Image (spheres, grey):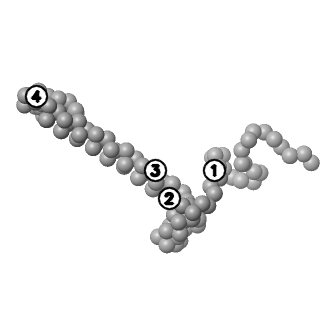
Amino acid sequence: MQPKFLAPSCYTDGVPTRHPRHTLTETDDVARALRSARELLPDLTDGQRLRRLVAVGAEALSEDAERELRERRRDAQLALINSGRSENELALILADTLDEPDAA
């Protein structure tokens, strides 16, 4: 019997999913994360823990990006405040930056 070669993937017969599958090597970092997850989520399987770690990691990355954007906006606002512009100019610029057109 010859093997089926359709497209490079890790699908096997009998696996009930159409979602892409990923291979994850248990490096030291992954092992540490799993150890922590086992303590915090004892009722889950390692697969469920890994999915949770991925979801929580994605959320943390999103929060980091949002925080960085807020910091950049604050820095730009402080630079404007220290630029020597009039209070009216600053109010208009800051209102536009904060998406508050009536703040001036």
Report the number of numbered marks. 4
Q: Residues within 10 Å of mark 4 (few under 14, many from 20)?
A: few
Q: Which is in the foreground here, disc 4 or disc 3?
A: 4
Question: Of the residues shown, which amino acid type is indicated by label 1?
Answer: His
Mark toward the start of the polypeptide (4 vs 1)? 1
The residue lying toward the viewer, choosing from 9 and 24, is 24
Q: Residue at x 46, y 54 (%)?
A: 57
Q: Which is in the foreground here, disc 2 or disc 4?
A: 4
| Residue at which label 2 appears | 53
Q: Which is in the foreground here, disc 4 or disc 1?
A: 4
Q: Residues within 10 Å of mark 3 (few under 14, many from 20)?
A: few
Position of the C terminus by quadrant: top left
44 shown above or below 71: below
- Tell me the CA gap for discs 2 and 1: 14 Å
| Residue at which label 1 appears | 22
Mark toward the start of the polypeptide (2 vs 1)? 1
Which label belongs to residue 85? Answer: 4
The residue lying toward the viewer, choosing from 30 and 38, is 30
Element under label 3? helix
Mark toward the start of the polypeptide (3 vs 2)? 2
- Tell me the CA gap for discs 4 and 3: 40 Å
Q: Is residue 98 visible?
A: no
Q: Is residue 3 visible?
A: yes
Q: Residues within 10 Å of mark 1 (few under 14, many from 20)?
A: few
Question: Of the residues shown, which amino acid type is indicated by label 2?
Answer: Leu
Element under label 2? helix
Question: Of the residues shown, which amino acid type is indicated by label 4?
Answer: Arg
* Residue 13 image point, x, y percent: 77, 51
